[in-house]
Image: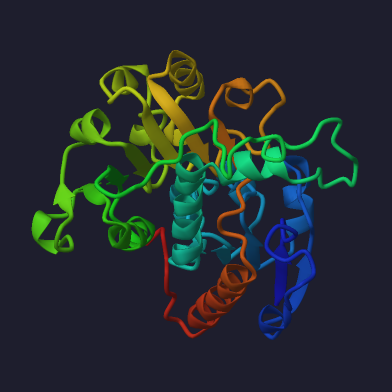
Amino acid sequence: MEIVFLDSHALNPGDLSWAPIEEFGNLTTYDRTSPQEIVARAKDAEVILTNKVHFGEEEFSQLPKLRLILEAATGFDNIDIQAAKAHGVVVCNVPAYSTLAVAQHAMALLLEVCNQVGHYTRAIAQPHDGSQRETPSYWAESPDFCCWDNPVVELTGKRIAIVGWGNIGSKLAELLLPLEAEVVAVTRKPQEVLPKGVKKVSLEEAFATSFAVSLHIPLSADKKGFVNAELLEKSRRGLILVNTARGGLVNDQDVADALRSGQLSAYCTDVMSQEPPQADHPLLHAPHVFITPHVAWATADARQRIIDIMTSNFRSFLNGEPQNVVNK
């Protein structure tokens, strides 16, 4: 069986083993694949592994041997699942592999705004490149035992709204509750299934009344750019917005404008609408932005879980009982 992984580098730059997948057939891996290279590289494949390579009607129509796509992620918006179904291709994703890793990262971004760890370490420590400061750190010049120019903030008693009560959103709530934050949820799930102390609220109430809002929903057509000027104008002034879900959930220019006006006090994100972003992306030049380069998912433990779950998906497909199918 011919198996092709078209964009393997991000998942496994060399620190993990492909042996579990190789047991099923001849595996060919490519670090990255451009749109123009997809068909040539995948023309003989019965099984394709991918993370971000786009598959639509054009690609499926030229890959008659293809039977299975193993999406190396939870999100599958890079695949036209209706086109896949029309061509008899099963698409399986990898759910819940990075639940704690991404929740931890969302918490880290929020705490970075509240505790200003990066700001203070940069102000005090020597540059990492080994060069010397032209002037001493501002703590060394302080007349007091402590000094601060950016305030630090406790989460105790602060309302934190979680938009989307899936695996990651609910795990973030578990991390927040011991800090005695007031956690509210925007979800279609009934109040009865939410943990004790977590109140269900509307999206508008969440943005209007919360200290911070954290996004944990998939990117769908009706949610594209839903965090826009209209919603932000109704939000509590000084709101912190955290996004570890999908960059396309926010209108980039509207968020940048809200940061400049002070309507948002910070935007913390691990995802962008275009990845990598162009140098002139509006959020790269906005104030009070905390951006990490889509690394929340990338712990070694989480990446190994992806390989393990894809292996299980592969085996289940071969046994005639496919699991984690997203285009039934």
Q: What is the quadrant of the C terminus in the image?
A: bottom left
Please state the horizontal and vertical placement of residue 23, each as a whole percent of the image: 69, 86
Number of numbered callouts drawn:
0
Please name whichever residue, 58 or 20, is drawn nearer the observer in this view of the structure: 20
Q: Is residue 174 above or below residue 266?
A: below
Q: Residue at x 90, y 41 (%)?
A: 131
Q: Residue at x 48, y 33 (%)?
A: 267
Q: What is the quadrant of the N terminus in the image?
A: bottom right
Q: Residue at x 51, y 20 (%)?
A: 256
* Res 263 → quadrant: top left
| Residue 159 appears left or right of 199 | right
Q: Is residue 310 above or below residue 55?
A: below
Please name whichever residue, 107 or 214, is drawn nearer the observer in this view of the structure: 107
* Res 324 → quadrant: bottom left
Q: Is residue 18 above or below residue 185?
A: below
Please state the horizontal and vertical placement of residue 32, each as a whole percent of the image: 77, 52
Q: Residue furthest front?
A: 143
Please state the horizontal and vertical placement of residue 307, each as a whole percent of the image: 61, 74
Q: Can residue 86 be seen?
A: no
Q: Residue furthest right?
A: 131
Please name whichever residue, 65 or 71, is drawn nearer the observer in this view of the structure: 71
| Residue 318 appears left or right of 143 | left
Please state the horizontal and vertical placement of residue 175, each as a whole percent of the image: 36, 61
